[in-house]
Image (cartoon, rainbow, N blue to C red):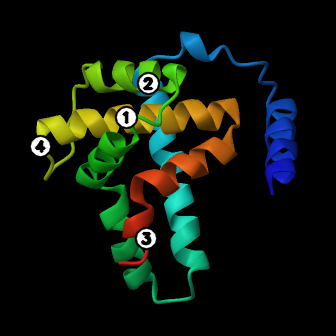
Amino acid sequence: MEESVSVLQRKFRETFGIGPLELRNYSPLTLAYIGDAAYELVIRSIIVEQGNAPVNKLHKRSSRLVKAKTQAEAAARLMDVFTEEELAVYKRGRNARSHTMAKNAEMTDYRMATGFEAVMGYLHLKQDYERMVTLVSLGIGDKLGE
């Protein structure tokens, strides 16, 4: 799987003329933007691969794992697991001043979730999917079967 993803990314970049990325130049909110989508794709993939079910049921299962509170809890669990680089990305994301906030979320949870999503975006753009899956497993693994 890892190799096919690399092939996909390479083809994507070749087709659309995208050069090498300088991740340090990306704003934390941009990393969180792509990280939100990458994380949700990981969660939806796990939920779907657990078994076929009506779409409404799939949506309910995945929604509880992608909400700000769950992401904030995952971030708290990962503080001692993050590498120095990931922790720096997390802090930049957490401290970024967003002009929006998720409905039904506390400000603290929203900021921590933004930091978590920034790390997911960083790992996605870095194409380090093995690390992304490891962090997701450590952060919310116990909630996947609920």
Cα–Cα span, label 2 and label 1: 7 Å
Indicate the quadrant where residue 114 lies: top left
State the residue at coordinates (43%, 70%): 144
Residue at numbered disc 1? 79
Q: Which marked residue is nearer to the observer: mark 1 or mark 4?
A: 1
Residue at numbered disc 4? 106
10 Å crowding of disc 4: few (<14), some (14-19), many (20+) = few
Residue at numbered disc 3? 144
Residue 41 at x, y percent in the picture: 55, 57
Residue at numbered disc 2? 87
Which quadrant holds the N terminus? bottom right
Looking at marks 4 and 2 on the same chain, the residue that comes earlier in the sequence is marked by 2
Looking at marks 1 and 4 on the same chain, the residue that comes earlier in the sequence is marked by 1
Which quadrant holds the C terminus? bottom left
Residue 78 at x, y percent in the picture: 40, 41
Q: Given contact means CB atoms under 8 Å apart, are the residues at marks 2 and 1 in contact?
A: yes
| SS at mark 3 in the image | loop
Looking at marks 3 and 1 on the same chain, the residue that comes earlier in the sequence is marked by 1
| SS at mark 2 in the image | helix
Q: Amino acid at mark 4?
A: Glu
